[in-house]
Each structure stands twice: as C-alpha cells, then as structure tokens.
Image (cartoon, rainbow, N blue to C red):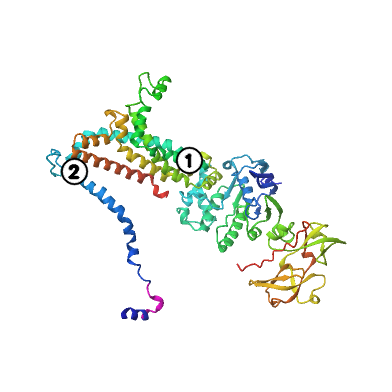
C-alpha cells in the first residue's frame, strides 16, 4: 500500500487512474453468453461433429454390427451421384416458393406497414395466426383443399384451367404451393419490419424531385427495404430447401425433395453414413448459395 | 406582374374541422426572398406544402407565372423543397442525392452539374460520403444543393436551419442569402425565427392562426406593425391601452390612465375607439425627472422594477403608476450611467416613434415585459 501511496503523491492527486472495473462487470458479457453458448454446444456443435464423423464411416457397416471409421470421403461422391436430381428439385422448388412468397408477401407487408393504420396490429395477427396450429395439421388441410374431389379442383376443371381429369394433389405445383403457404409469414415479417421503418418524408422528397410514385418506389422504397427482402428470402429459402413434409403429404415420390431422401436414409434404409453425407452436402450447398447471395445483394451498404 | 411570379389566390386548407390555412392571397415576385413567419401551428408549413404539391388545397389556387398548378402532382411542378428534416436518401451517397432530380428528368451531363453545385455549397470532395457521415450543417447544404440543381422556378425552404446551433445558423443565413443573390431564384422561406426572417427576406408575411396578419418589408413591419400580434411577435412592443380622445390637426389624441398622448395620423392604424398606443422598448429613453425630458417628447413616470445587463444594452422594466410594466432598452454606448433598481424615472419617446393599433374593448395593456436573456 505504501508503494501506491508513494506513486499517488508523485503524479499528483488528479492523475490517479480510474479504478479498474469490478471483476463481475468485466465478466458480465460472458455470463450473458453462457446459456446460449452451452445450448449450442450441447445441441448443435457436438451433434454436428458427430454427424460429420458418421458421414465418413465405412458404409458397409450397419446399426447392428457398428460402423468403422475409415474416412470414407467417397460417401459424398456416392450420395451426390445417386441423388443429384433431388438436390436440384429441392433448390428449384424452394426457389420458386421463395419467389412466390416475395411476390405475395411484399405487397402484403407494404400494405400493413404503410396503409393499414389502425388495422395494422390486426393484420399482423392474421399473418401470424397460422402458427397457432401445427405445421403438419395445416399441410394436411391443404391435402383436403387440393384433393381430386375438392371444390377447388372442381372449379378449376369447370372453367377449363384444369383438364377434365386434371388434378392438383400429387403434382409439383401442389408441393410448391404448400411450401409457399407454409413459409409466407417468414417472408412477410422481416419485410414488414423494414417497410415499417421507412420514413414517409423520403417519399415526399422523391416526389418533390420529379420522381413519380412508381419511380419513387423503385429508387427509394425498394432499395431501403432490401434488408427485409434479403432476410425474408433467406428465412424462406433455407427451411424450404430442407423441407420434406410438403413433398411427403402433397406430392408423390416423383416430387420427393432432398429432405425426403435424408429422412428415408436415416429412418427407413438405416444408411447412417449416407444420410449424414447428404445432410452435410445440403448444408454446404445452402451455405455457399447464401454467401454468394448476401455478397451480391450488398445489404451492408443499405443498413 | 412578371411571368415568374408565384400567386396564392384565396388558398384554404382544412383538416376536418380545423382550418390550417384560412383564405390566403398573396403575390411573391420572381427572384424575391420571401419569408413566411409565424409560431408553430400557424399554417405556414401547410401553405408551403400546398405550393410544393404535397398537400392539396381545400379551395383556392396556386398560380405560377399565371399558370394554375393547384392540381398538378408534386413531381410535375417546377418547384423544389429543402425539407426541415432534410430527408436525404440514406442509401445514396452525396453525389447521387444531389443528382437525383436530374436523373429523374433524364438530363445529361450530370457529373459537371453536380460538381458545380457541390462547389456552390462548399462541399467539394464530399460526393462519395453517405448522409449519415455528415454533420448537420453539411447535411443541410446537401439538401440545398439537391433542390437548387434543378433550377426550380421557386425554391421552398421549410425551416431548413431549425436543427442547427446558433452560430452555424447565422453562418448558413448569410450563405443562403449569398446563394439566392447568386442564382436569382424565388425563395420562399418558412421560419418561426423573427430575426432570421428579418435578416434574410425582402418581404415578410407574418402568419397567425392560418391568416396573414401583415405583409411587407422587414423594416416596414417592425417600425409600423398593424396588429398587436405582429407588434409583439416581431420584436417586443409596449402597448398601452387607451381611447382616442379627439384630433388636433395632424395629430390623433389619446387618453390613457388619465394622461394625454398624441400620435401623428400617419402612424395610426385606427383613428377612433379603443386603441393601443405602441412604443418599441429601444425607442423609450430614461430621464431622472420630467424637467430633463427634451421638448416635443411624451412621457410616463415610473419606478425601475428590474434590469438586465445584456452587454450591448441594458434592459429596464419600469413599473408605471397604474401598475403595469413597460420595458426600455438603453444602449451601453457609455453615454448613460446604469440606473439602479427602485429609482424613480421618466420614460419618454418621440411621438413619431409611436404607433396606434386597434384594441378590443376591455383588453388591458399588452406589453410583454420580459427581459431578454443573454443569448
């Protein structure tokens, strides 16, 4: 203590450094990270490593005999060559569904954010309402709606959009429509969040500077809502690409997506190494696409 | 009337039962610097927005160069606005913000025009910055450049200096005036700052409750206000309640609180009935007793009740025998000694510095005996 006192007098009372923050305060951010970090470690990181290991097991093993770790990278090549059409179909269906969600969701989100006024909250509740019932139940309901004896098919046949023996259920259209329906709220909510923040005065300024309402939309509203568009498309595309419920319930094996293949590899064929390799491939493909997409849309400049 | 004049004809705007702008008619000559002055909520911004096309008039017309533009959409009007909030596009850099209007109209040679405009507002080299990277004063200049580059027939300024601190505001006032002289456009400037309106504009319209109370050159309005509102909104005035007692030649005689005063007829807005006798505080001089009041002046006696030293002048409150206070500003030119509180004084003025306004029966003195605080 005498040393501290000595230094104190040497530099003068005004230059004593502020006391270091208490230890608890410095640790606080880490403490806040702890629950989430633990959760991710136990339920994501460890299983992911486990899954990565599984994908490299000797495929000739079985659940009963056990698997040998043989660093079998060939599993990936085999999985891709056997199931590349399913990968393509998944990306195609998810892509079309995302596009449809954007086309349906943008006007909806715009209307809620800019035009709904006192009905805003009610409309938001309506967007979220489907979540009150299970994903499975809702998709099963679509099965009824699209069924061959349903009113929708009847009307479409009567007005000639479908042939007299045309059908909706068990077609690619049914799967894409199901995906679109199920993921629409994931598109609408981020779009709403970014359109709600849009300052109406910027549109007035654009109008004042010779931009017609259409030009003002293209030059001001749309670029400023890009963060919402990017977030919405990611939140729609990623889960849609891995979905298997819609193809299972509304399609046939001809519409099966990569999710269905992984599902059957794990639970029916019990081919764990291949199922794990397929899962990792899907993850890698989506990550690569998201990376390119986010880079190219350049949203960091908008924020 | 020259061909670029802006005319408002019986312009009215109602929001439900509230009348924001009440039957305004005025002409703003081409190339003039016109200020709409008033307290917040007086309808000045609504008037401006109707000229810009951002608000549709309930009735009346906006004419620009004789052409009725009342129903023209904002993007088709040869009018640009500098918004109070600036409303710069956050996703575009300074260059693109300034180029916005040119691009929308498909005008070529954008680069040189934008660079010339940035030079005019002294922002060379800032083209690549984002609005968020600029200070308030710089943002204000971008907003100005963005509007000016389009060479509008009329430039509308909606309290563009309101968000700036005092020093920057004074600087920008001089700057704006310089630019207006340089480009020769019609400027319509909305402000609640009377000093700003007076220093910048050739013509000031004082608005109150949706109507124009008085319109004229700043000095004209200040020296001879037409209503008690104007007399106290544009600077301060001492307004003594009285009645017209008669006339003597060119003088109107007023009796107030048992004393007789007179005002030249040319300085009277009314010549009979209940009136306010108005004198500006800086035109009131103090003397120790009635003997030292120069001849030809009029006076009231009183006691100094408060004083405030503001550097260039000292502001006194003088309590009159009938209980109200008048204020007198005395320049600190070193001629007069400071008068202590409690001293008996005589406040005197020249009759041709006074003015006579109409007063509603029963209304008392309408002086605002507030000592200005040191800025």
Tell me where residue A17 sits by quadrant.
bottom left
Residue B106 seen anywhere in this rendered image of the structure: no
In the rendered image, residue A269, in percent from the top left (x then y), is placed at: 19, 34
Side (left or right) of A88 relative to B206: left
Is residue B367 on the magenta stretch?
Answer: no
Is residue A15 on the magenta stretch?
Answer: yes
Range drawn in magenta? A10-17
> Camera-side residue: A127 or A165?
A127
Q: What residue is rendered at 72% in x and 71% in y?
A: B318
Q: Name the residue under label 2.
A: A54
Judged from the image, the secondary structure of the residue bearing numbered disc 2 is: helix
Q: Residues within 10 Å of mark 2 (few under 14, many from 20)?
A: many
Judged from the image, the secondary structure of the residue bearing numbered disc 1 is: helix
In the rendered image, residue B39, in percent from the top left (x then y), is placed at: 64, 55
> Camera-side residue: B330 or A196?
A196
Comes first in the chain, label 1 or label 2: 2
Both marks 1 and 2 on one chain: yes
Q: Mark 2 lies on which chain?
A: A
Residue A238 seen anywhere in this rendered image of the structure: yes
Q: How crowded is mark 1: few (under 14 residues within 10 Å), some or many (20 or more)?
A: few
> Camera-side residue: A152 or B87?
A152
Q: What residue is rendered at 35% in x and 43% in y?
A: A293
Furthest residue in direction top, as rendered: A164
Quadrant placement of the N terminus of chain A: bottom left
Q: Mark 1 points at which residue?
A: A122
């Amino acid at each position: 203590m005498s040393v501290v006192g000595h230094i104190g007098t040497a530099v003068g009372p005004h230059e004593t450094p502020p006391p270091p923050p208490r230890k608890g305060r410095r640790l606080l951010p880490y403490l806040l990270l702890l629950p989430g970090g633990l959760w991710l470690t136990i339920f994501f990181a460890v299983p992911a490593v486990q899954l990565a290991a599984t994908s490299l097991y000797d495929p000739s093993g079985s659940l009963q005999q056990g698997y040998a770790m043989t660093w079998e990278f060939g599993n990936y090549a085999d999985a891709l060559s056997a199931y590349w059409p399913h990968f393509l179909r998944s990306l195609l269906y998810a892509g079309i569904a995302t596009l449809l969600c954007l086309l349906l969701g943008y006007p909806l989100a715009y209307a809620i954010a800019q035009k709904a006024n006192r009905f805003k909250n009610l409309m938001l509740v309506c967007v979220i309402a489907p979540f009150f019932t299970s994903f499975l139940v809702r998709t099963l309901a679509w099965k009824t709606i699209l069924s061959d004896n349903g009113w929708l098919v009847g009307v479409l046949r009567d007005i000639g959009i479908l042939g007299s023996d045309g059908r909706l259920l068990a077609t690619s259209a049914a799967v894409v429509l199901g995906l679109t329906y199920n993921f629409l709220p994931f598109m609408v909510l981020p779009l709403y969040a970014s359109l709600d923040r849009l300052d109406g005065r910027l549109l007035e300024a654009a109008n004042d500077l010779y931009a017609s309402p259409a030009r003002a939309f293209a030059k001001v509203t749309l670029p400023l809502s890009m963060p919402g568009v990017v977030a919405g498309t990611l939140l729609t595309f990623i889960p849609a690409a891995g979905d298997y419920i819609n193809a299972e319930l509304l399609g046939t094996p001809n519409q099966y997506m990569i999710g269905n293949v992984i599902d059957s590899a794990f639970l029916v064929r019990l081919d764990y190494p291949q199922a794990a390799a397929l899962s990792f491939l899907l993850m890698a493909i989506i990550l690569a696409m998201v990376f390119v997409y986010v880079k190219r849309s350049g949203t960091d400049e908008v924020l | 009337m020259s061909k670029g004049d802006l005319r408002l004809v019986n312009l009215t705007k109602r929001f439900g039962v509230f009348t924001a702008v009440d039957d305004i008619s005025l002409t703003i000559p081409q190339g003039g610097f016109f200020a709409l002055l008033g307290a917040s909520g007086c309808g000045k911004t609504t008037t401006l927005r109707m000229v810009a096309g951002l608000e549709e008039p309930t009735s009346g017309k906006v004419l620009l160069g004789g052409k009725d533009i009342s129903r023209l959409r904002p993007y088709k009007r040869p009018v640009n606005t500098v918004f109070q909030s600036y409303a710069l596009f956050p996703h575009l850099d300074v260059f693109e913000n300034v180029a916005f209007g040119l691009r929308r109209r498909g005008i070529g040679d954008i680069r040189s025009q934008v660079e010339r405009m940035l030079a005019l507002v002294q922002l060379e080299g800032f083209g690549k910055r984002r609005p968020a990277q600029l200070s308030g004063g710089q943002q204000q200049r971008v907003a100005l450049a963005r509007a000016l580059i389009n060479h509008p027939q009329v430039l509308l300024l909606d309290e563009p200096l309101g968000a700036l601190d005092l020093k920057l505001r004074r600087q920008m006032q001089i700057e704006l005036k310089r630019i207006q002289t340089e480009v020769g456009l019609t400027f319509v400037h909305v402000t609640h700052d009377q000093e700003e309106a007076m220093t910048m504009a050739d013509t000031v319209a004082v608005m109150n409750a949706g109507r124009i109370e008085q319109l004229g050159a700043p000095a004209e309005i200040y020296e001879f206000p037409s209503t008690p509102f104007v007399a106290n909104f544009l600077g301060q005035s001492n307004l003594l309640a009285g009645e017209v007692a008669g006339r003597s030649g060119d003088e109107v005689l007023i009796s107030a609180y048992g004393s007789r005063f007179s005002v030249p007829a040319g300085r009277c807005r009314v010549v009979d009935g209940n009136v306010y006798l108005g004198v500006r505080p800086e035109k009131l001089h103090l003397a120790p007793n009635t003997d030292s009041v120069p001849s030809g002046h009029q006076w009231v006696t009183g006691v100094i009740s408060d004083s405030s030293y503001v550097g260039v002048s000292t502001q006194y409150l003088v309590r009159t025998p009938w209980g109200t206070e008048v204020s007198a500003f005395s320049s600190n030119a070193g001629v007069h000694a400071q008068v202590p509180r409690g001293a008996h004084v005589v406040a005197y003025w020249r009759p041709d510095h006074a003015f006579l306004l109409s007063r509603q029966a029963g209304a008392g003195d309408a002086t605002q005996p507030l000592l200005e605080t040191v800025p």
